[in-house]
Amino acid sequence: MSAWRPGTRNLLSDVAGVRVGHAGDERLKSGTTVVVLDAPSIASVAITGGAPGTRETDLLAPENTVTAVDALVLSGGSAFGLDAASGAQAWLAEHGRGFAVGEVRVPIVPAAILFDLANGGTKDWGRYPPYREFGYDAACSAAADFPIGTVGAGIGCTTATVKGGLGSASTLLSNGMTVAALVAVNAAGSATIGAGRWFWAAPFDLGGEFGGLGLPHPFPLDATDPRTKLDARVGANTTIGIIATDAVLDKPAAKRLAIAGQDGFAKAIWPSHTDFDGDLVFALATGSSGTVPEASDRVELAAAAAATVARAVARGIYAAVATPTDRLPTWKDKA
């Protein structure tokens, strides 16, 4: 596994045919991230948190008819944020994209949301929340190069100990395939060990991409004491993400990839998958490499999925920046 290295950008877009855009409002402390696919791609989903918020996830089950999606949406705003998918769908419709039903095309845009309504931002948006416009604007701006940290769905993210954020990472496998992740980290638990700044994801750090601190020595005696948001309540926390590959996968294999991606949450956040999290991972397989993985390749693909998601979690927190009315320090400002 020592042959693994980050892709050129160390972003989700290192998987060819994938672009990412953000929109949001720092005054609201909320936003949306849209992943636009150059061509419809195989997709599935794994949900392990106790408080998910989703749109169009049932169609991603392996037994259901639609196999490919046109875009995926990660958004703040809790249930209000599900409107973001309508904006992304409108942009796709304007560009003639969608699942063909006779002469009609319906853009397929599954979405997941996180709770950032009580993070210090002003949520006085009037009759209608702004997420539909966020979704449209994010789709418009989608590009191969995009920022991480306090952007898009990561604007209002928090964790138990420091400010959260939107992270991304990629891995080039020894067999030539690429795996990449995009994660909005708004966890009930902590991505750092004990009261310090060491990341739980430290063993997977490639080249100091999130500080290079390694693991603490000696290990803090209280490291495994669960640190959670004191006011945790149902629907208040979520880590949502996407794991993508250029391998050729069918829907059942994409489902397995999403499940493997969930292991990255467990490796980067303690505790994870709680009753108060809506933890969710979408999986995308663009097939752009033309490679159909053999059995041994599938094992490496799954391992890389977990490691890459863990790295994306840490990178999102590492890249977060301070903004007015923050209620938690950023990782870089933490003493």
Image (spheres, rainbow, N blue to C red):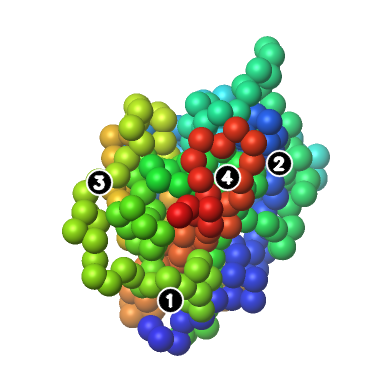
User: Which numbered disc, 3 or 4, marks the residue closer to the eye?
Assistant: 3
- Where does label 2 land, which residue? 23
Identity of the amino acid at label 3? Pro
User: If you read the primary sequence from the N terminus, does the residue marked by circle 4 or circle 2 appear first?
Assistant: 2
Label 3 to label 2: alpha-carbon separation: 33 Å
Q: Does dot 2 land on a helix, a strand or a loop? A: strand
Residue 200: quadrant of the picture: bottom left
Horizontal side, residue 38 vs residue 78: left or right: right
Residue at the farthest front position? 335
Horizontal side, residue 9 vs residue 42: left or right: right
Q: Position of residue 202 (x, y in %)?
A: 39, 68
- Where does label 4 land, which residue? 154
Residue 58: quadrant of the picture: top left
Q: Position of residue 110 (x, y in %)?
A: 55, 41
Q: Nearer the viewer, residue 324 or 17?
A: 324
- State the mark number for residue 226: 3
x 56%, y 37%: residue: 326
- Where does label 1 land, which residue? 293
Identity of the amino acid at label 4? Gly
Residue at the farthest left position? 221
x 36%, y 49%: residue: 190
Identity of the amino acid at label 1? Pro
In the picture, the quarter occupied by the C terminus is: bottom left
Q: Does dot 4 land on a helix, a strand or a loop? A: helix
User: Which numbered disc, 4 or 2, marks the residue closer to the eye?
Assistant: 4
Label 1 to label 2: alpha-carbon separation: 36 Å
- Badge 4 local density, few (<14 within 10 Å), some, or many (20+)? many
In the picture, the quarter occupied by the N terminus is: bottom left
Residue 185 can be seen in this image = no
Label 1 to label 3: alpha-carbon separation: 38 Å
x 34%, y 45%: residue: 189
User: Which numbered disc, 1 or 2, marks the residue closer to the eye?
Assistant: 2
